[in-house]
Amino acid sequence: MKLAPIITSLLETDMYKFSMGQAIYHQFPAYKTTWTFRCRNKDVKFTSEMVQEIREQILAYCDLRFTEEELTYLDNIRWIKGSYIDFLRLWRPRYEDFSITEEGECGLSIETRGTWLNTSMYEIPTLAIVNEVFFRMNYNYFDLFESFREKLREKISWLTSGKYDLSSFSEFGLRRRLSAEAQELAVRELSEAKLKNGKFVGTSNVYLAKKYNLTPVGTMAHEWIMCVGQGNHKHNPAYSNWYALDAWVKEYGVLNGTALTDAITTDCFLKDFQLTYSTLFSGVRHDSGDPVEWGEKMIAHYESLGLDPKQKTLLFSDSLNFEKANALNEHFKGRVRVAFGIGTYIANDTFVTPLNIVMKTTMCNGQDVAKISDTPGKGMCKNPEYIDYLQRCIDWRMKYE
């Protein structure tokens, strides 16, 4: 490796990987998935040297193991069970599950194949590695970091002066951070700042949450709905949310309950998010589509069921900055609890455009899977025929059920 190791602990992933991981371990241990990397920036090119560094960094990541101190920390989280801790004690990443080549349009292709238990855990560290390698090897990193530090200082001054009120917010930037150093600086500075309005409650990065005694934040991602709902070939994929919510409640009951609404459109989600699930889940997360329209829709849905929206939380997490979050907080204040997960804007704001990279499940149990979100183009599926099939299933349900 030309750079120092980027991922230095298996805790350095997003919290929802453990939330989903435990449920996968207990209910879907035999499921197998394929994950595919994609860079959405059209002008980005990874060099051969960068690709080799990414290989070396992932190889080093695969040598990591959970320490007993880390496992004790996870074991003290209320909804984590001892059986899953014992599994993690034995678990290790497998480099053999990775395929890393220069064949992609951007000069980099990454796919992982194996059990869902394994491949789910690779997504976040892989993206963090790709980001940091790119920015350290493509730019003057010192200048980038100084730009980041200056912008962070300004952001914190806005919060301490009361310019913005973000209610309850967390840092969600691990997958697209400038570097481990930059993310840690942001989390540390935000945790120590005396905010005039609102509260910084935590981070999705479990390693940093442990280090700075913050709340590790995260429940489910799109992969959960896609694989649970579409991985069983006997399921009608238009009912993906029902299968996913049912399995989640089986695992957690009333704990750890923030439901993601847009895997196959929020309108279809609401068909299944009826009184039982709306009562059991403490809130819902927005990740695509117009956030105000979505929030109004969720409030109306809770009210139609006779539930008090003021007892529920709307978690916004789609491409936020402080200005957008402040406006949303003002719009919904007093009507519903509001929280924000803010990623790239906190963890990778410099004088250059951040990478827009993703790694998504593209197959489960040998079958295509897909999401059809509330924003066109956010999905990623290799088979257009499957997307057409999924859309027709959703359309039929919305029209006739």
Image: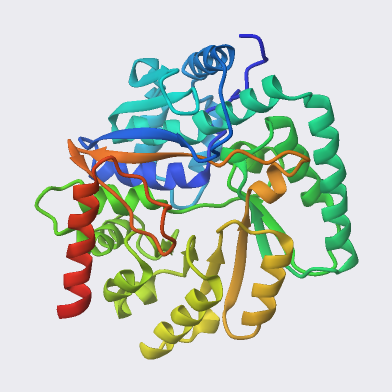
Q: x, y (%) of residue 364?
A: 23, 40
What is the quadrant of the N terminus in the image? Answer: top right
Left of 153 or right of it: where is 92?
A: left
- In this view, the residue in front, 323 or 12, is 323
At 44% across and 86% down in the image, what residue appears? 300
- In this view, the residue in front, 284 or 47, is 47
**Rendered position, 90 above or below 345:** above
At 49% across and 22% down in the image, what residue appears? 107
Q: Quadrant of residue 182?
A: top right
**Rendered position, 176 above or below 172:** above
Q: Quadrant of residue 194?
A: bottom right
Left of 86 or right of it: where is 145?
A: right
At 52% across and 16% down in the image, what residue appears? 51
At 68% across and 66% down in the image, what residue appears? 324
Q: Quadrant of residue 185?
A: top right
Q: x, y (%) of residue 172?
A: 60, 49
What is the quadrant of the C terminus in the image? Answer: bottom left
Q: How many marks?
A: 0
Q: Is residue 25 visible?
A: no
Q: x, y (%) of residue 352?
A: 73, 38
- In this view, the residue in front, 235 or 274, is 235
**Rendered position, 9 above or below 316:** above
Residue furthest to the front: 43
Q: Is residue 35 visible?
A: yes
Residue furthest to the left: 234
Left of 207 or right of it: where is 52?
A: left
Q: x, y (%) of residue 334?
A: 64, 85
Q: How is the image coloured?
A: rainbow
**Rendered position, 282 above or below 82:** below
